Image (spheres, grey):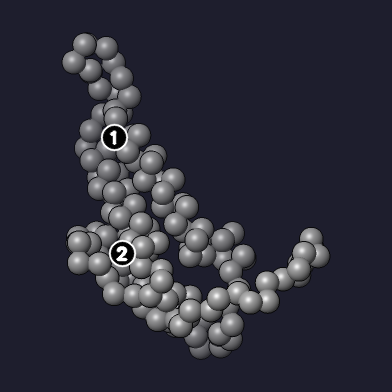
Amino acid sequence: MGNPGHRPLPKAEPKPVTGAPECPPHLDGEAKKEWDRIVKDLDELGMISSLDRAGLTIYCTAWARLVSTAKTLAEERPIISAPSGRLEKNPNFSIFDAAVKHLQGAMAEFGLSPSARTRIHIDKASTDEDEARFFESS
């Protein structure tokens, strides 16, 4: 669609050197597995730099929380009995919903959804071979 709003395009946009940031030492388990997976793919596409470490940490932490809570919810009832005896929604649903929102926000920042990818433009020209390799690893 080009530039439908005809707004001026940024001319002096900062362009950090691309490359994979180091994984924070506190990430482990599911968060570390997701870090290794997503950083590899984003690095191959030239879409990350060391400046993205905090954002990637948020993404991976939210992913790990979502996975953990989904496993817990699979084993628990959606409605529980509160100490007062009233029936209430399992509080893990709120944790799950918050993880989904955090994950969606981080996904948008890194172009990790189909709609978010339409807004990402990078200078690196990909070849058909690059794209094939990316989709094979998915």
Position of 115 relative to 3 (above/below): above
Quadrant of the rendering where the C terminus is positioned: bottom left
Picture coordinates of residue 70 (x, y %)? 29, 44
Residue underneath mark 1: 92
Secondary-structure class at tag 1: helix
- With 5 as the anchor, is 100 left or right in this view? left
Q: Residues within 10 Å of mark 1 (few under 14, many from 20)?
A: some
Q: From the image, tell me which residue sits under label 2.
A: 34
Q: Is residue 136 visible?
A: no
Q: Tag 2's secondary structure?
A: helix
Q: Is residue 129 above or below residue 5?
A: below
- Residue 13 picture quarter: bottom right
Q: Residues within 10 Å of mark 2 (few under 14, many from 20)?
A: many
Q: Quadrant of residue 85?
A: top left
What kind of residue is marked 2?
Answer: Glu
If the image is split into quadrants, where does the N terminus sit?
A: bottom right
Left or right: where 107 falls relative to 2? left
Instruction: Tell me the kind of residue under disc 1.
Output: Asn
Across and down, in percent, residue 129 comes to: 51, 88
Compare residues 98 and 133 and report the one nearer the observer.
Answer: 98
